[in-house]
Image: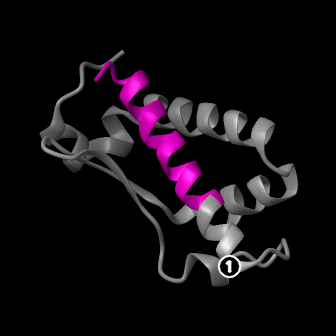
C-alpha cells in the first residue's frame, strides 16, 4: 500500500491511490447496501457517486464533493428529496470513514 501523502493525494489520487479509493468506496457501498434499500443505494452509487470527488484537507480531513444537482441526477429511483438528502449525507459520512480507515488516518 502506498503511504498517504496529502499533496500526492490531491495531485495524483487516481494514479497513486486508486486501489485504496476503490476499496473505501466499495466498503461504504456494502455498508450502506445492508442498512438501506438496495435500489436506492445502487442508484446513488451509479448516478451520483460516479461523479463524486474525494478531497483531503489536513484540518478537516476527507470530504466528498458531489456533482451539481445530485438529487436531479437520480432518475432510477423514486424517493423524496428529504429522504435522499438524509441517505446521501449518511453515505458521504460512510465514505469519509472508510477513507480514514483505508489510509490509516
Colour scheme of the picture: one colour
| x, y percent for residue 97 | 44, 34
- Please state if 20 lies on the left or on the right of 11 as rendered: right
Q: Position of residue 60 (x, y in %)?
A: 21, 47
Magenta-drawn stretch contains 103? yes
Range of magenta residues: 87-105
In the figure, 89 relative to 58: above or below? Answer: below
Q: Which of the two residues, 79 or 105, is positioned nearer the viewer here? A: 79
Residue on which disc 1 sits = 81
Report the label total: 1
Q: Nearer the viewer, residue 45 or 40?
A: 40
Q: Nearer the viewer, residue 72 or 10?
A: 72
Asked if 75 appears above or below 58 in the picture, the reply is: below
Could you say where residue 57 lies in the image, as x and y percent from the top left? 18, 47
Q: What is the quadrant of residue 39 in the picture?
A: bottom right
Please name the predominant secondary structure of the magenta segment in the image: helix
The residue that appears at 68% across and 34% down in the rendered structure is: 31
Amino acid at each position: 500500500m502506498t503511504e498517504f501523502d496529502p499533496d500526492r493525494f490531491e495531485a495524483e489520487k487516481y494514479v497513486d491511490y486508486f486501489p485504496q479509493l476503490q476499496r473505501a468506496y466499495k466498503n461504504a457501498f456494502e455498508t450502506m447496501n445492508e442498512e438501506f434499500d438496495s435500489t436506492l443505494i445502487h442508484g446513488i452509487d451509479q448516478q451520483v457517486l460516479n461523479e463524486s470527488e474525494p478531497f483531503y484537507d489536513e484540518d478537516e480531513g476527507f470530504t466528498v464533493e458531489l456533482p451539481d444537482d445530485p438529487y436531479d441526477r437520480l432518475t432510477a429511483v423514486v424517493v423524496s428529496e428529504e429522504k435522499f438528502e438524509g441517505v446521501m449525507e449518511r453515505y458521504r459520512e460512510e465514505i469519509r470513514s472508510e477513507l480514514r480507515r483505508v489510509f490509516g488516518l
